[in-house]
Amino acid sequence: MSERHQIRDPVHNFVELWEKEIKLVGTPLFQRLRGIRQLAMANLVYPGALHTRFDHSLGVCHVAGLLSKQLGLNDNAETTLVRLAALLHDLGHGPFSHVSESLLERYADRSKLAADQKKERIHELVTAHLITTDSNILRIIGEDTAAEVVKLLSVGHGLPAMKAIVSGPLDADKQDYLLRDSLFCGVEYGVFDVHQLHRSLVLDGPENEKELMIDRDGIHAVEQFVLAKYYLTTNVYRHKVRLITDQMIIRAIVLGIEEDELEDLHAIYAFDNSPEFVRRYTRWNDARLMASSCGEAKPNTLCGGLFDRLLSRRLFKRVFQERIQKFSEVEVRDKLLTLGGKAKTEEEREANDKLRKEIEAAIGEVLSKHFYGEDGEKVDPLEVILHVFDIKSVRTTSRNDESGIPIASRGTPVFFQDESALFASINESYTEGFVEVYAPAPLSWSDRTQRSKWLKALSAPVREAIESIVKPTLRGES
């Protein structure tokens, strides 16, 4: 029997690693994940949220193993591959985890990608590159297995159920991060009965095409899981301090690259599909990026100023919040939503950037007037952040990349979203969009009475400033 090792885990009690997995965890590439926090700087509002991609990856491997055993996958081939994919799935994450994803997308040179890679997410391409080229990984699992792991993580390999375990509506990744993030944030929004959920899952379908499905008696267990994901998203991932810190990190790096012209910072995110980029990229983690970008290391830079604020928790404030539905014109609402979405082309991204800067400059004028008066200090428009996002209905968020959760049935396939009495009654098309503005505020912002007065006074003029820029754009005016 191959060597196995148990690691004490605060979420799952004990996580058992198999022989090759132990060796993979010991590689420099995997150990790097200890320096990348799961929730970026969410610890500024949830002090316990210091857990990392390292412990999350161990947990995902463990949960994937439990799912494989529950579904009766073959230990020697199928389970081994599923566990390896689960263990290695986050290798491509950059500093501050998901915060790096938008920056990789922004600065990647997609002309260097093969035709079948151009629509892939950059951090997933980095993960695939690492798994198939790192000498330590190849020495441990071999080239053929590495290629199978990458295939399983992308288009799938073997039974469809294997793909669903590592990437699907009920995958091991979601199961671990819900429980882990809840525990370390000190909340119970994401808690669900993981063992009952596993007992509710079955393999069903034609031989060699078996899919992960839920037993009809397991609908309530899945309802609990989906609600846990929804509540953790709305209460933790969308917490205003979490949103502000994420946007401050992104703005600091964008300003460092585009205004301060810091070549070393640009090099971290300028993905060009080369081995040199990957070697450079994997030398960075949260602490190194923060230390190299703060004011002491980069004095008199915009980037350094923002990172100094993050280090000392002098955060921007949310000076404006409005539901997109409150904007009177449909065209304005639609245009704002495009600013919160992912641009499909470089031209669209540049147009969105231009519009965003114009809106932020107009809002900066409003803030300067209200905070300091006509002749007082000015709010720097580069430090005004317009953030647009939406919260979809819980029924929509129960899906994964438009894939529903099938219920085992001998007849016509049915899906959880339609069979659950709770979810069937929910309007799937409902989406609530928000426009928020984050910016530096005067010291007196800490006075609750003064803050309430400012927020009330700013609501109408900020909305008008946004509309004053968006409406001429819709008419084709500059």
Image (cartoon, rainbow, N blue to C red):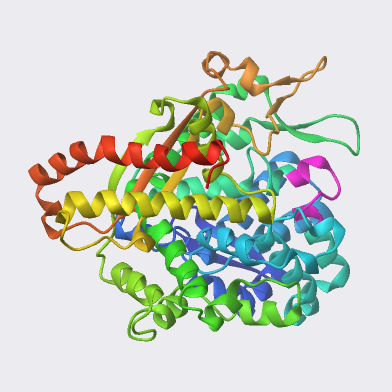
Q: Quadrant of the N terminus?
A: bottom right
Q: Residue 34 appears at what percent x and percent y? A: 50, 72
Q: Residue at x 68, y 48 (%)?
A: 344
Highlighted magenta segment, given as a residue range: 151-163
Residue 129, x across and y down, in percent: 75, 70
261 lies above or below 449: below
45 left or right of 274? left
Question: In terms of depth relative to the viewer, which is nearer, 254 or 478?
Answer: 478
At 25% from the left and 70% from the top, the residue drawn is 312
Residue at 84% over, 50% down: 157
Let me know if residue 47 appears in the view. no
Of the pair 373 and 352, the residue shown nearer to us: 373
Please tell me whether residue 155 belongs to the stretch shown in magenta: yes
Vertical position of residue 282 compared to residue 170: above or below: below
Magenta stretch containing residue 283, yes or no?
no
Please tell me which residue lies in front, 402 or 109. Answer: 109
User: Where residue 11 sits: x, y (%)?
Assistant: 46, 53
Q: Residue furthest right?
A: 207
| Residue 419 visible, this orientation | yes
State the residue at coordinates (60%, 56%).
350
Percent position (x, y) of residue 294?
37, 79
Residue 439, compared with residue 287, is above or below; it is: above
